[in-house]
Structure formats: C-alpha cells, structure tokens
Amino acid sequence: MKDRSRLRPQSNRWGRALSGILISLWLTAPLPAQSAAADAIPWERLTTGMHVALWNPRDTCPQVPALLMLQIDPERFRFSVYQFRDEGLRAPISIHDWQHRTDAYVMFNAGLFREDYSYLGVLLKEGRSLGSKKHHSWQGLFAAEPTDGTLRKARVFDLAFDVFTEDPPMYREAAQSLMLFDRMGKLRVRDSGKRAFQTVVAEDGQGAILVMKTADIVSLHHLADCLHRQLPSLQQAMAMDGGASSDVIASQDLLHASKETASQSTWRSLLAGNTGVHIPLPTVIGISPRTPARAGIPVDSLQPPRKP
C-alpha cells in the first residue's frame, strides 16, 4: 500500500494552483451586462451639476427606443412646480412658452390631469396645494425643496413605503404620478401593451435626479424593466404624463453656452424641442440654478459626470 501522507503535499499544491487559476479567471472576467451598460451612458456636461446623454438600449432592450437623459445635482439646482391657473393664465401654454415665462434652464411635464386640466393627485407649489387629495393607486411622488434643512433637496417618494406629510408639508414642491419600479426591484406597472412617448423621473444611489424622455413610443412595462435591469445605479423611478404631453426642453441660453460638437447632434435637437408636436401643458416642472449665473454658464462637455 502506498503511503498517502507522502502524496498529500503534492495534491495540496495542485489544489492551490487550481484555486489561483480560478480566482485569476474570475478577476479578469468581463463585468456583467448591467454594470457595463451603466458605464456606457455617453454623458456630456451641459453645465456644472448637469449632464446630458442620448442612451440607446436597443441591443439589450429591443422594444425600448433611445432616451434623452438629464442628470441633475439637486445641491446645485432647484425644482419648481408651475400650474397655469396659479400663474394667472386663462389656458395651458406650450412648454416653450413655459420656459420663456419662467426662464428655467430645463422644463419637463408633470403628471396626469383631468379634462378640465385639474391635476390628478398631490401637487404642491411653495407649500400650497394646487392639486387634489393623494391618488389612492398612484404611489410615485417627486418632491423638492424641503422645509427641513436636514432632508435631501429632491427625491422620489414611493408612497407604498415612504411617509409624505402635506400639513405641514415636508417639501415645498411636489407632484404625484405613477411608480415605475421601486427600490426592491419590483416593477410597479402592468404590461398593458399600450405604447406612448414617456417622461420618467428617477433618483440614483448618490442622490442625483434623472429626467428622461423617450425618443419614440414604448410601453411603461418594457421601459421599467429595461431601466431596472440595465441601469442598476437607479434606486427607483416614476413616470410622469405620457403621450402628447411628454416633453422635455432646455433653454437656448444653456444650449448656446455648450460648445456644439459632432457628438451633440444626437441629443441637441431633442433637448432644444425642435422635433415633434408640443401641446399646451397645464402643469410643468422647471429646473433652475440655486445661484443665478446665467451670464456665464460654466461648460466643459469633455468632463464626465460623477459615477452613479
């Protein structure tokens, strides 16, 4: 019989070598598709604290079109709700007219409304209610400008888990709408098969707010599934009103301050609002700098945004 004690050291050496090979293979293996996709967003800097990209996920999400995406730092930018009656207007106006009226850097549509243009759900402007009671089935709420200085400047509330008080208001600006997916990864919209242009508001793991608009029609379910799978940095997301109401534009001052390059042609016309039809909107949300500096917008389109 062979002495097994003499064979044991050799087998241990082989085991250690095999383990080393496996660890090396694991360390050099390509990252999962989710992480790669998150790093593949072609961000360009519009101004300090704001970045833009046109992200096309068709390779991994064939039913989802390209998305115009804005990444905003709430520490540098404030969000303001505007409603036509509160502004003393007789009727809703286009998003271009809203931008000219408010001088906001960026403007996007808010949530859903009734035929008489009254808002469906919670809508707060400077702490005043401009909407109705909380909608019982819509659990998304975008809120900004907290009354308590210890709270984040802007965030997405999931009313299925988060408490939001209106009296007194936790945040001065708020707009309720639909949840797309939550922080647990659950999709919160059914696969109805209906497709339309969509506007999305999301927050990432570092507290940045992302505003997105699809370049073509898509179902909310497919969009939610794609964003959740391909952009793991997103904590949760909600959908604003879609269809003809879906709209996102930037001011001409902001666009002119950004040196035009060949790569910008993919998103510049979309962000300028030069494509599609722009219907009158009763309620919008504007994004403006906390420190006014319109005369000299700092721009460096070559620097990437912070990592999500």
Image (tube, rainbow, N blue to C red):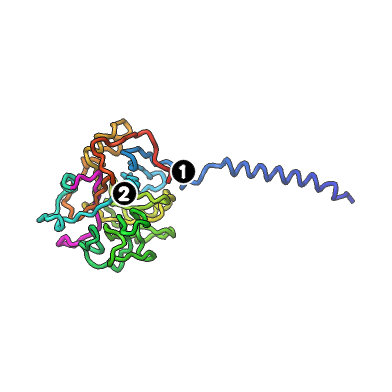
Give the labeled residue for mark 1.
36
Give the residue displayed 76% in from the left and 47% down from the top: 12
In this orientation, which residue lies closer to the viewer: 136 or 146? 146
- Extreme-right residue of the structure: 1
Q: Where is residue 183 in the image (x, y as percent from the top left)?
A: 42, 58
Name above or below for residue 225 compared with residue 121. Answer: above
Say which quarter of the image contains residue 67. top left
Residue 270 visible somewhere in the drawing: no
In this orientation, which residue lies closer to the viewer: 177 or 99? 99
Name above or below for residue 78 compared with residue 175. Answer: above
Q: Does the magenta stretch include residue 233?
A: no
Q: What is the span of residues highlighted in magenta in the rendered image? A: 102-118
Q: Where is residue 249 in the image (x, y as percent from the top left)?
A: 24, 44
Left or right, 22 with respect to 79, comes to right
Left or right, 125 with respect to 154, comes to left
Name above or below for residue 90 compared with residue 255. Answer: below
Give the labeled residue for mark 2.
211
Give the residue displayed 38% in from the left and 35% down from the top: 303
Magenta segment, prevailing SS (helix, strand or loop): loop
